[in-house]
Image (spheres, rainbow, N blue to C red):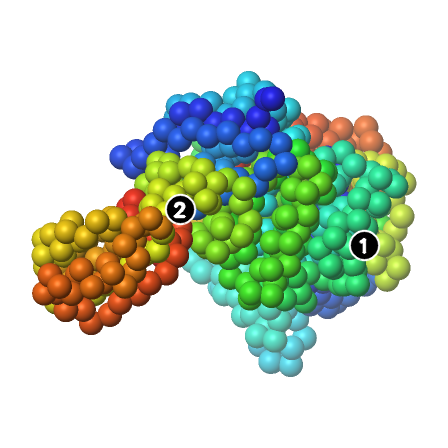
Amino acid sequence: MWPLILKDLRRRLRRPASTLVMVAFPLLMSLALGSVFGGGGANDRFPPIHILVENQDPDGFLANALVNALGSPRSGDFIQAEAVGDEGRSMMEKGKASALVVIPEGFSQALLDSRPTVIHIVRNPSEGIKPEIVVLGSELVATYLDQGSRLLGGELGQIKELVDARQIPPAAKVGAVAARITERLSGARDYLFPPLVGIASAKEAEPEGANSSTGGGVFGYVLMMTTVMALLFVAVRSVGDLFEEQNSGMLRRQLATPMPVARIIAAKFLFSVVLGLLVMAILATTGLALGWLDVPAAPGAAILLGLVFNLAACGVVAVIMGLSGNEKQAGIMSWLIVMGMSALGGSMVPLQQLPAAMRGLADYTLNYWAIDGFSQVMFEGAGMGDVAGNLAVLAGTGLLLSVLANALLVRRFRKVAP
Amino acid sequence: MTPVLEVRDLHKVFGDLTAVDGISFSVNEGEIYGFLGPNGAGKTTSISMICGLLPPTEGEVLVMGLSIAEDPRGVKRLLGVVPQEVAVYEELSARMNLEFWGGIYGLKGKALRERVNGLLAQVGLDDRAAEPVKNFSGGMKRRLNLAMGLVHDPQLILLDEPTVGIDPQARHKILDIVKQIAADGRTVLYTTHYLEEAEDLCDRLAIIDHGSILAEGTVAELKAKLGEGSLLTVQGGFKAPELAAAAGAVAGLQPVEIIDGRGMLVVGRDGPGVSNALSGLFQAGLAFDDITIKEPNLEDLFLNLTGRELRD
């Protein structure tokens, strides 16, 4: 099998353009996205998004609750909110913030009366991604408030009375309202807004200060995200080489040798994994040299993750090719599935920035398991045991799909003769 | 003596199309056996079945007594296959291509290097061995294509139209290499639709069309099927029965093919001679626009057997 792998490596070395693109893509994406987010060294994380909040409902307790929530330490990881008055729009015109959030007058009362109300967001046109994140986040908050006001309309009115009384309310009255709210939330949470509750739980489960132990910079994180996608394309190119060899007559010629077709295909898989690891090594070395990454505490875990991810990537691509009717169909299907997995799995947008509904789908992508594992190993000091689940999912998927793909491709390529 | 290759009643059917229709032949050690036929005659399909790329619908292939159906890997070890298309890795050098194919057959180290060096010299590529194949001319690629099928020193070499699309000089070079291979004791099955190649190269050959062997033997034996003597071809405004009647009246003149306006006749060595034969035809009142006299060749035999020319 070694001559087959050596031959493919030599061919790739002599025709390096496509491999160089796979190496250049994550580096360029890291530079571009890292610059958008303000860059940063290995010890910087995504810089918080600076927003202005103009509260035109200063006496409304729900409006104040929203302003306080934006300014809470937990939000501070992602958002730095600055309370402003009328000067908000002129500050936006000067590009002082990513977005201006305007809470309208009567906002709280409108929610209590179940009347429609609108939060206005003014985006900074000179920034591409950050304002979009603010819009997405605000939509999330609006959904929370809308659902909450519908569910807790009566109780919110009672809370307002307690707050407006400007005196310490009786404990029994507070307890009664709290009990009713808890009862309503408990009854409704499973079917009313599972994705929102899901997100809230995930955030709250995160230990305080967990992020502060990470060492990944923006460049490093984006490099990791995009490298995972690039490795999928390496698999597409490497396994797709079987079609190229079929068209050139080389595969037919190999099939006339004593080499079994299953071994020829297995050699192509191995070549794909080896090339993927080489590309990964080049990118990791570049990341280290540029100071975008730190040497992980458990390099073995990173290498093993790379190995099983490349195997799984190869398996997915090979199954697509085995099931496709022809080379063109296989190319289009592979591209769509790689792009889809990358979009849902965190290779294009960081997982924590994805909308809740999309995050639920991330588990079904290879990208998610790889990025989650690499993220733990590279930025949180995790070891082999911490990413055992990721390793198991990727290795299991890789082995299963490789066996299936081999069977499909053996059947296909046995028919190459006229 | 066991033949190196024995093919028995081989059939291949694709749906409604019978590509190979019951061919049988055998090839002995050191022999160059030719498969002569037009494109689509079933030559490549036959080769594909012999080398195990296609399962036959019916029939059997034995290589040195081993059945391809029962021991495909054992048979494939004995075979060197040179496909019709130039199947080489263009980005690799000639040496790398040969090393790859040698490696596939288990050659390595010094044995592989020596074999590769020997072959590069044999096919005249030793001075360009390190260059990417994409820089080669068509003839050089064809020579490398041939060498790749020989790297493991096979007993039986299957050459499927190895000279298609190259200039006469490069073709002569390849034919010389094939002759040398046979002189070294290797057995060759050679398919072609070039008559000159078949006549020049093959010890024995089969004329194949529509998946069937129409005639088989040495070149001399096949030519003899047209009769000994000169081949007289006439063209004019006559009808077929008129020429047939006139030819029948001349002793020793054998009709090969007669149609309206065209006739092919053999003037036997013991017959009347060409001038007397022509006199007999003129005396019958026939007029000709064109008269050709030549020794019969395989093209004439193919025309005689199939009613059409080889390059139709």
Q: Position of residue B75 (x, y in %)?
A: 61, 27
Q: Residue at x 26, y 67 (%)?
A: B291
Q: Is residue B221 above or below residue B248?
A: above
Q: What is the CA distance from the residue labelled 1 to the residue labelled 2?
A: 68 Å
Q: In the rendered image, which quarter contains the N terminus of chain A?
A: top right
User: Disc 1 marks which amino acid?
Assistant: Ile
Disc 2 packing (10 Å; few <14; some 14–19; many ≥20) = some
Q: Secondary structure at mark 2?
A: helix
**Residue bearing the label numbered 2:** B223
Q: Is residue A206 visible?
A: no
Q: Residue at x 81, y 54 (%)?
A: A282
The reply to whether label 1 and label 2 mark residues of one chain is: no
Determine which quarter of the picture holds residue B208. Answer: top left
Which disc number belongs to residue B194? none
Q: Residue at x 37, y 47 (%)?
A: B228
The residue lying toward the viewer, choosing from A329 and B253, is: B253
